[in-house]
Image (tube, rainbow, N blue to C red):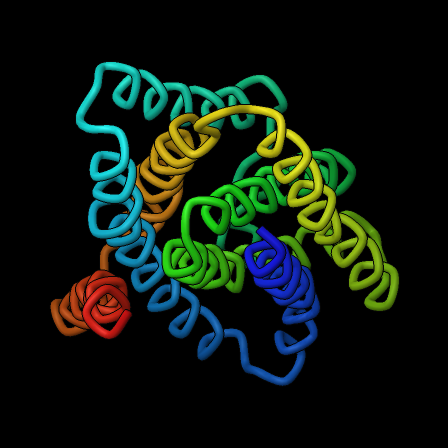
């Protein structure tokens, strides 16, 4: 448990620091940034789905067998993220703000982002409770989709009237909720038998929702030349391949 705790807090610390990546948007031209982000979104979508079907679900089925509860908890994970978007009016967006790509108000984004980071922390800690290898794979998947998301969040805060320093500060504060989420997961996990039976399939459901509802639709918002579509496809497959590679070398 001590080793899992150490790995988990190192991982959520890394995830929290990803919030500072927004500052890079000032060193990159707008057109180049959009091209890079869309490939990152493709890569992240593949990594999330790869983590679900290569790591998360096989791990819980291996441990507990394929039971109806597992399917139900996957649906609970999907429902949780649906509620976050539908009722809290938070959009897990991965592209910078433009006139053609509007975002919710900054304050609402901070609230939603804080809740999302809290869940990310619980997801990472819950994966480490199951196994170190699963925790590492899940951390990588979270980091990959956090990079474009944090760039988008930074743009939202600037669009909402925050200056650069204030935007970075508040983005980092909401990112620290991942640490709190990890603490909560370990506290709950120590008191609930078979905690991974609940947490892992819920995580899988959340990742399926993020990939299917937020990331993949982002790739279809505008028509692009065939060459760019192929590049997105390659990035998508590479994301899955990275998850497979982690399994093979683990």
Toward the viewer: 127 or 17? 127
Q: From the top left corner, tell me how far across and down residue 29 is, in percent.
A: 54, 81
At 27% across and 50% down in the image, what residue appears?
Answer: 55
The answer to whether 225 appears left or right of 215 in the picture is left
**Residue 145 in sight:** no
Q: Quadrant of residue 6?
A: bottom right
Q: From the top left corner, tell me how far across and down residue 109 is, in percent.
A: 68, 39
Toward the viewer: 236 or 243? 243
At 27% across and 36% down in the image, what residue appears?
Answer: 63
At 64% across and 71% down in the image, what residue appears?
Answer: 21
Asked if 249 appears above or below 186 in the picture, the reply is below
Asked if 180 appears above or below 22 in the picture, the reply is above
Toward the viewer: 26 or 222? 26
Q: From the top left corner, tell me how far across and down residue 11 is, in percent.
A: 58, 62
Q: Seen from this angle, which residue lies furthest bottom?
A: 27
Asked if 141 appears above or below 184 in the picture, the reply is below
Q: Quadrant of residue 172?
A: bottom right
Quarter of the rendering occupied by the C terminus: bottom left
Q: From the top left corner, tell me how far across and down residue 190 is, in percent.
A: 61, 33
The answer to whether 149 appears left or right of 46 in the picture is right
Q: Quadrant of residue 57?
A: top left
Asked if 226 appears above or below 49 in the picture, the reply is below
Toward the viewer: 38 or 175? 175
The answer to whether 115 appears left or right of 128 in the picture is right
At 22% across and 34% down in the image, what residue appears?
Answer: 61
**Residue 64 in sight:** yes
The answer to whether 202 appears left or right of 20 in the picture is left
């Amino acid at each position: 448990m001590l080793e899992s705790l150490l790995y988990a807090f190192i991982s959520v610390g890394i995830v929290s620091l990803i919030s500072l990546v927004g500052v890079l948007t000032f060193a990159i031209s707008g057109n180049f940034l959009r091209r890079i982000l869309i490939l990152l979104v493709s890569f992240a979508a593949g990594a999330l789905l790869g983590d679900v079907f290569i790591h998360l679900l096989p791990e819980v089925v291996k441990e507990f067998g394929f039971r109806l509860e597992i399917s139900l908890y996957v649906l609970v994970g999907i429902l949780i993220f649906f509620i976050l978007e539908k009722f809290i009016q938070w959009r897990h967006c991965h592209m910078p703000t433009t006139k053609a790509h509007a975002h919710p108000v900054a304050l609402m984004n901070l609230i939603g982002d804080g809740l999302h980071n809290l869940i990310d922390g619980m997801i990472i800690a819950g994966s480490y409770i199951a196994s170190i290898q699963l925790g590492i794979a899940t951390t990588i998947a979270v980091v990959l989709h956090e990079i474009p998301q944090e760039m988008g969040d930074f743009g939202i805060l600037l669009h909402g009237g925050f200056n650069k320093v204030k935007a970075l500060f508040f983005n980092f504060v909401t990112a620290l909720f991942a640490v709190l989420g990890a603490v909560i997961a370990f506290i709950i996990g120590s008191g609930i038998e078979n905690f991974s039976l609940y947490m892992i399939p819920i995580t899988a459901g959340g990742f399926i929702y993020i990939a299917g509802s937020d990331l993949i639709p982002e790739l279809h918002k505008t028509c692009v030349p065939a060459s760019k579509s192929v590049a997105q496809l390659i990035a998508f497959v590479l994301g899955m391949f990275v998850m497979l590679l982690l399994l093979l070398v683990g």
